[in-house]
């Protein structure tokens, strides 16, 4: 099934350690794609498949594109992706970089931590959501991220920077999430968001 199904439709909920492992695997897979200059462009929890042992696999490459070796951006005339996970520049049809996937990963990290669908009930249509995001609105971060380590919350904040140039690389996101997983294993559950 999908990560979305595991979060919202299964009787048995994922525990924090399982969530940290899954999100770490997601970042590893995305870092690999970016090393091959591939932008997914439609990341969301429905496009993360989970095997029986909860190994995460990235799926649905219908919107994916390879960035030319002659350029650092993907120029496109079509807006594609799942609105709740779309980066500001993706919503406006600007040239895209790997930063759109970093934004989408940060939204998924928030969704996994909060057990809530992003932006749910806040905006009735794409135009209102787009307006809010372009004005810099972010998903609400709680005062405490318990039991998630601080690195996890940092990855969300870093990945949801409004300007694409201010977002970290997927390799840095992977490092933050790996550190979060290690911190959880050490029971170093520093949880201030």
Image: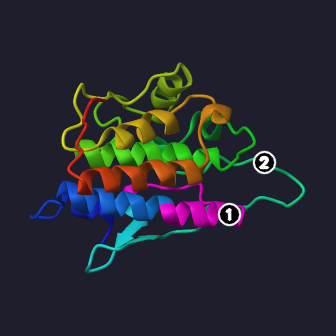
Q: Nearer the viewer, mark 1 or mark 2?
A: 1
Q: Quadrant of residue 116?
A: top left
> Would you place residue 57 above or below residue 145 in this image?
below
Q: Residue at x 31, y 56 (%)?
A: 20
Does residue 27 appear in the picture of this structure?
A: yes
- Residue 33, image quadrant: bottom right
Q: Residue furthest right?
A: 70
Q: Which residue is mark 2?
A: 73
- Residue at 27% x, 29% y is 192
Q: Which mark is residue 35?
A: 1
Q: Is residue 171 above or below residue 58?
A: above
Magenta residues? 28-45
> Secondary structure under badge 2?
loop
Q: Is residue 29 magenta?
A: yes
Q: Residues within 10 Å of mark 2 (few under 14, many from 20)?
A: some
Q: Quadrant of residue 61?
A: bottom right
Magenta segment includes 115: no
Task: Describe residue 13's horizontal placement relative to residue 17 as left or right.
Answer: left
In this rendered view, identify the residue nearer to me: 9 or 153: 153
């Amino acid at each position: 099934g999908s990560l979305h199904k595991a979060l919202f439709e299964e009787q048995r909920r994922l525990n924090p350690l399982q969530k940290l492992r899954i999100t770490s695997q997601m970042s590893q897979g995305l870092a690999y794609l970016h090393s091959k200059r591939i932008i997914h462009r439609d990341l969301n929890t429905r496009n993360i498949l989970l095997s029986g042992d909860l190994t995460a696999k990235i799926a649905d490459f219908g919107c994916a594109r390879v960035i030319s070796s002659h350029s650092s951006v993907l120029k496109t005339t079509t807006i594609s992706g799942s609105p709740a996970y779309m980066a500001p520049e993706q919503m406006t049809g600007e040239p895209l970089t790997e930063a759109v996937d970093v934004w989408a990963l940060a939204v998924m990290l928030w969704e996994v931590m909060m057990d809530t669908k992003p932006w749910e009930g806040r905006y009735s249509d794409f135009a209102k959501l787009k307006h809010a995001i372009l004005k810099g609105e972010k998903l609400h971060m709680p005062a405490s991220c318990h039991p998630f380590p601080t690195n996890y919350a940092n990855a969300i904040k870093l990945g949801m920077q409004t300007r694409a140039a201010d977002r970290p690389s997927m390799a840095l996101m992977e490092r933050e999430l790996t550190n979060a997983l290690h911190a959880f294993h050490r029971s170093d559950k520093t949880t201030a968001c």
